[in-house]
Image: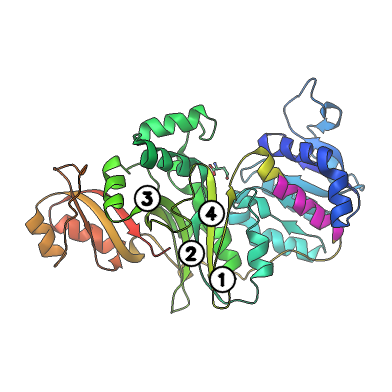
C-alpha cells in the first residue's frame, strides 16, 4: 500500500526513516500490507537527500494519486494542514497526524469527515510523542468511567524545571540550555507559556470525557514566573513543581481544565518524570490509576507513533478505527479564575494583612527561602479568590501554584 508524508521536518523525516528501516517488519509483525512511501510534500528543496526523488512541492500530486491511500501530516500549524487533511479525507484517503494544534482545534470536524468517507483519522503522536497513551485511553480503558487525566505534557518545560530543581539553575539559564540543546525554539512561548500543553490536555479531555474541549475555553499559565524560591518552598512541603495539564470531571457534569505550575508530592510517578520525558496519569472507576511515561518528543519516538497509526490504517482500510467525541462548548469548561484547588502562594506584603484575608494560614519557614517574600498554602478556593484576597491584603503576588494529589 502506497503512502505519503506531508512535511519533511523533524517528525516527517523520522517517519520516512522509520518506514524505510522497519517497513517490512511492521507489515509482517502487524499483518498489514507492505507500506511503501511514494511521495513527500515540502516546499523546501533537499538536494542530495536520500528521498530527494520523491519530494514534491505540489499537494495535488498526493491528493490526486489514486495509489496513495494513507497520508501522514507532520507539517504542524493549522493552515494549510487543516485544508490539506480535510481534502484528503474527502478524497477517501486515511490520514494520521502528529499535529496537536490541528487535533485540538479541528479534531472533531476531521473525525466526522473521516467517518463520512469511510476512512480513518488517527493522531496517537499528537500527545506524548512516542508514548502510547491515546489508544490505551480510548480502547484499553473503554470499560471505565474516567474521572481525571493529568500529566507532564511538555518536554521543554519539564527540562527547564528539572534543571531548576536538580541543578539550582535559574529559569533564564535553564531556558538557554534548553535552546542550546534544541529542545526549545528561539521563540519558546508555546512551550513556556503552556500553550502546547493546553492543546494536549484538551485532546486528552476530548477522549476521556467524550465531549469537545475547545482550547480557547481553558486557561494556561506557564512557568515564566517560577523562581528558585518556589522550588525551595515546594521542597519544604515535600514535593516538586511541575507544569501539569489536568482535566477533571466535576460532580455537575462540567470539566475542570487547566495547565499550570503545580505542586507534586515526592514519590509520585509525576515527581520523578524528569528532563524531556512526559508522563500521563489516568483515573478510572474500574482500573484505579494508571500512568504512561516515556519520550514526549523527538524525531524517532514521534515517528514511531505516526508509523504505527499508518500501519493501523493499512490493516483496517475501510474499517473505522478512529475514536469520536460529542460536540461541546466552552460553557462546559471550568478554568482560569474559576478553577478550585488549594494553592501554594508566594507574595510580598504584611503577614497580618494576609492572615486577615486567609484566616488560620501558616507561613512556610525553610532554609533558602528569601526573607522578603512570604510563602503559604491556602484552603480550597477558586484561583480568582486567591488573587482578590491578595489584592485586598495589599500584597504583591509572586506566584500561585496549584496543589495536586497526584
Ligand atoms: N515542544 C514540544 C515539547 C514538542 O517540548 O514537548 C512535542 O510536542
Q: Answer whether labels 1 and 4 touch (C-beta < 8 Å).
A: no
Report which residue position mark 1 lands on.
Answer: 209
Report which residue position mark 2 lands on.
Answer: 247
Chain-order first, disc 2 or disc 3: 3
Relative to 299, 345 lies left or right: left
Labels 2, 3: front one: 3
Considering only vertical position in the picture, is 379 above or below 22?
Answer: below
Residue that lies at the very extreme toward the left in this rendered image = 352
Query: To which quarter of the image does residue 164 belong?
Result: top left
Where residue 295 appears, as percent x and y from the top left, is: 59, 46
Report which residue position mark 4 lands on.
Answer: 279
Q: Quadrant of ligand 1?
A: top right
- Dominant secondary structure of the residues highlighted in magenta in the image: helix
**Crowd band around label 4 with a 10 angstrom C-alpha radius: few (<14), some (14–19), many (20+):** many
**How far apart are the alpha carbons under marks 4 and 3?**
14 Å
Report which residue position mark 3 lands on.
Answer: 241
Amino acid at each position: 500500500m502506497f503512502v505519503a508524508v506531508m512535511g519533511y521536518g523533524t517528525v516527517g523525516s523520522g517517519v520516512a526513516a522509520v518506514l524505510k528501516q522497519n517497513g517490512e517488519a511492521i507489515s509482517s509483525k502487524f499483518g498489514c500490507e507492505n507500506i511503501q512511501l511514494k511521495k513527500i510534500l515540502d516546499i523546501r528543496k533537499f538536494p542530495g537527500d536520500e528521498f530527494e526523488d520523491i519530494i514534491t512541492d505540489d499537494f495535488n500530486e498526493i491528493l490526486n494519486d489514486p495509489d496513495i491511500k494513507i497520508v501522514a501530516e507532520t507539517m504542524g500549524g493549522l493552515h494549510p494542514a487543516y485544508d490539506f487533511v480535510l481534502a484528503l479525507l474527502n478524497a477517501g484517503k486515511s490520514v494520521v497526524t502528529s499535529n496537536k494544534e490541528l487535533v485540538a482545534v479541528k479534531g472533531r470536524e476531521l473525525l466526522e469527515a473521516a467517518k463520512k468517507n469511510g476512512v480513518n483519522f488517527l493522531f496517537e503522536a499528537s500527545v506524548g510523542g512516542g508514548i502510547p497513551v491515546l489508544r490505551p485511553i480510548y480502547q484499553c480503558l473503554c470499560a471505565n468511567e474516567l474521572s481525571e487525566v493529568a500529566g507532564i505534557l511538555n518536554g521543554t518545560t519539564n527540562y527547564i524545571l528539572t534543571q531548576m530543581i536538580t541543578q539550582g539553575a535559574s529559569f533564564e539559564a535553564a531556558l538557554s540550555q534548553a535552546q542550546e540543546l534544541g529542545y526549545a525554539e528561539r521563540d519558546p512561548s508555546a512551550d513556556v507559556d503552556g500553550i502546547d500543553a493546553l492543546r494536549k490536555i484538551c485532546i486528552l479531555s476530548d477522549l476521556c470525557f467524550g465531549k469537545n474541549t475547545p482550547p480557547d475555553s481553558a486557561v494556561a499559565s506557564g512557568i515564566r514566573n517560577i523562581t528558585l524560591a518556589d522550588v525551595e518552598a515546594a521542597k519544604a512541603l515535600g514535593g516538586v513543581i511541575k507544569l501539569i495539564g489536568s482535566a477533571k470531571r466535576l460532580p455537575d457534569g462540567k470539566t475542570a481544565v487547566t495547565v499550570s505550575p503545580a505542586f507534586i508530592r515526592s514519590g509520585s510517578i509525576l515527581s520523578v518524570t524528569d528532563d524531556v520525558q512526559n508522563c500521563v496519569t489516568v483515573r478510572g472507576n474500574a482500573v484505579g490509576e494508571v500512568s504512561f511515561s516515556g519520550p514526549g518528543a523527538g524525531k524517532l519516538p514521534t515517528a514511531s507513533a505516526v508509523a504505527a497509526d499508518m500501519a493501523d490504517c493499512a490493516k483496517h482500510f475501510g474499517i473505522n478505527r478512529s475514536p469520536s467525541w460529542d460536540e461541546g462548548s466552552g460553557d462546559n469548561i471550568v478554568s482560569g479564575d474559576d478553577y478550585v484547588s488549594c494553592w501554594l502562594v508566594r507574595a510580598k506584603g504584611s503577614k497580618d494583612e494576609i492572615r486577615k484575608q486567609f484566616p488560620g494560614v501558616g507561613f512556610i519557614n525553610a532554609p533558602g527561602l528569601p526573607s522578603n517574600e512570604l510563602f503559604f498554602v491556602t484552603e480550597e478556593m477558586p484561583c480568582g479568590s486567591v488573587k482578590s484576597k491578595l489584592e485586598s491584603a495589599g500584597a504583591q503576588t509572586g506566584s500561585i501554584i496549584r496543589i495536586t494529589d497526584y
